[in-house]
Image: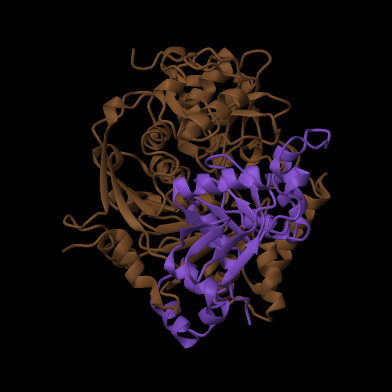
Amino acid sequence: MGKTLYEKVWEAHEVRKLRNGQSQLFIDLHLLHEVTSPQAFGMLKDLGLRVRYPHRTFATVDHIVPTHDRTEPFADPLAQSMLEALRKNTLEHGITFFDLGSGNQGIVHVIGPQLGLTQPGMTIACGDSHTSTHGAFGAVAFGIGTSQVRDVLATQTIAAQKLKVRRINVEGRLAPGVYAKDVILHIIRHLGVKGGLGYAYEYGGSAVEAMDMESRMTLCNMSIEGGARVGYVNPDETTFRYLEGRPYSPKGAEWEEAKRRWLSFASDPDAPYDDVVTFQAEEIAPTVTWGITPGQAIPIDGRIPLLEELSPEERPVAEEALAYMGFRPGQPIKGVPVQVAFIGSCTNARLSDLREVARYLRGHRVKRGVRALVVPGSEWVAKKAEEEGIAEVFREAGFEWRNPGCSMCLAMNPDRLEGDELAASSSNRNYKGRMGSPRGRTVLMSPLMVAAAAVTGEIADAREVFGIGR
Amino acid sequence: MLEKFTLIRGRAVPLRGEDIDTDRIIPARFMKALTFEGLGQYLFYDERFDERGNPKPHPLNDPRYQGASLLLVESGFGSGSSREHAPQAIKRAGFKAIIGESFAEIFFGNATAIGLPCVSLAKEDLERLFQAVEKDPTLEIAVDLVAKEVRFADQVVPLTLREEAREALVEGLWDPIGELLQAGELLDAFDRKLPYPRRAE
């Protein structure tokens, strides 16, 4: 009987069994950011411990950085103190820190892959739930809490519980104007936000195999919104092509050896799964959320469900969502006015995301009254976008071109919604208050759909706005 | 020596709502801090207070539930962000355990690791408990992690809790750092064996 990648990676990293039956799991790569790490360094100090393997931890600053004016000290002294704490902690413990202006600062889940830190067969942990992103490379990557950040710093291990594995096949070809973001919103819509509890999601099938690495990252990124702590795609030639020549990728003879090793982690054809679900790519349309959980999503041509169309379990949250969003049951989502358009976040702020939007945005203008922002995922993405003329396309269209960070996705910096503003957003969470205003509203969608909303001033079908596939 | 969680008694606050995410439990702006100190006061802040800071109707603002030490929730509690700030805020607000139908994966692990048991009841049992508490906020509830049951009024209902977590809580092993450190040189062997990213010279 074959094994899944999850099983193989787990076996290669299980140090031993703990007394309560959990496993002590070795973490190959640990990523840090400024929000969930200072307390962990504090705990370490209280226990008189040091960072055991500093060569396995890398840090950057993303959540709290202003994207407009990054001159220090920041206007927000708390944000400044968090940056300084990370500088001090990484320096004191010999941890590599990709600081502002280093050329490599950015959203932690953008820079890991971009630098070649993220590699197949690894276990990767970070105090951030979207660590699942790194699974795109065939790594087992998951978010951890701050106490576990302490555990990894002190021992490079965590106490962990093995998950079940659900294989999710997406077969066929995605239609033009349909992206990985639509695929994952479609999957969560059907399997539910609790559907992944207790599971790792293995994505496969011809549509996933055809995806480039950055699309696979978008897909794996939102596994957590589907309740799965881990999401991954088996490594293949696409993975290797992406990794070759990156700063931290193996080189020369080591490269050939690494590829052989990485491929050996891929799930065997006869690997058993705890569950298998198959979706047809052709059935996936540009998908947008209408509510306050990422599972409350519909195709752009769809209508917000009537309460009687929902199961009794879904109704209370749907009612809460309708009241919060100010929507009526049965109302079309298309045509809802937007005040803010946000392209950014660890889900969709990579170079390919920006390239794809720029391809269609040329010659269009952001509608008067819409505040439109692009926040590139990293300093490297920003630089490349400038070089390729992409940044200029956005600026000419009336988007604000910002500096890299998490920005409005969770509004820990000055970028936020005001009052009950509605944002068309390429981020990952539409929770109440997520974008910084307790009454602010978020509609999740692909970056191109955000651009369509920006230029029309309402939720729109990007295929119509930009004449795609017609 | 860590506390052993065998029997937890107290009154409960009924907090209805499915899939309550960690952004609601503790809005991101309150994470701008270097420690977890004082987080308890921001628990469910945007649900409890309006934009001017005036209290809104919410079970946690309801005087009848003041002093309760058990948090009663529905299903999918703690979804979203991995922020340990969420269980930290609950614990620091004085809660000793959470009773619900189901919990998000990372939230459950974070809560367990700081000694905040999250126990699950069958949907019907949970609904009975909700109604009993809503009817009588002074109701005393016992969460018995050894007998694996929750007792209230004249009722005894079974609780479920992942065996590894239950064991860790009952035996006082919920903070794993001590045991993880004991692996000692075995860790060095793994560090030598498993590749890590290196920048080419």
- Residue A449 lies left or right of residue A273; in this view the side is right
Question: Who's the residue at 45% across and 28% down the image?
Answer: A297
Q: Nearer the viewer, residue B151 or B5?
A: B151
For chain B, give the colour. purple
Spot occupied by residue A181 in the image (x, y as percentages of width and height): 43, 34
For chain A, give the colour. brown
Q: Is residue A223 above or below residue B182?
A: above
Q: Nearer the viewer, residue A246 or A352?
A: A352
Q: Nearer the viewer, residue A367 or B97?
A: B97
Spot occupied by residue B190 in the image (x, y as percentages of width and height): 42, 78
- Residue A435 lies left or right of residue B57; in this view the side is left
Question: Of all residues shown, which one is farthest toward the front?
Answer: B154
Question: Who's the residue at 45% across and 53% down the image?
Answer: A229
Q: Is residue B89 above or below residue B127?
A: below
Give the image quarter of residue A303: top left
- Residue B200 lies left or right of residue A100; in this view the side is left
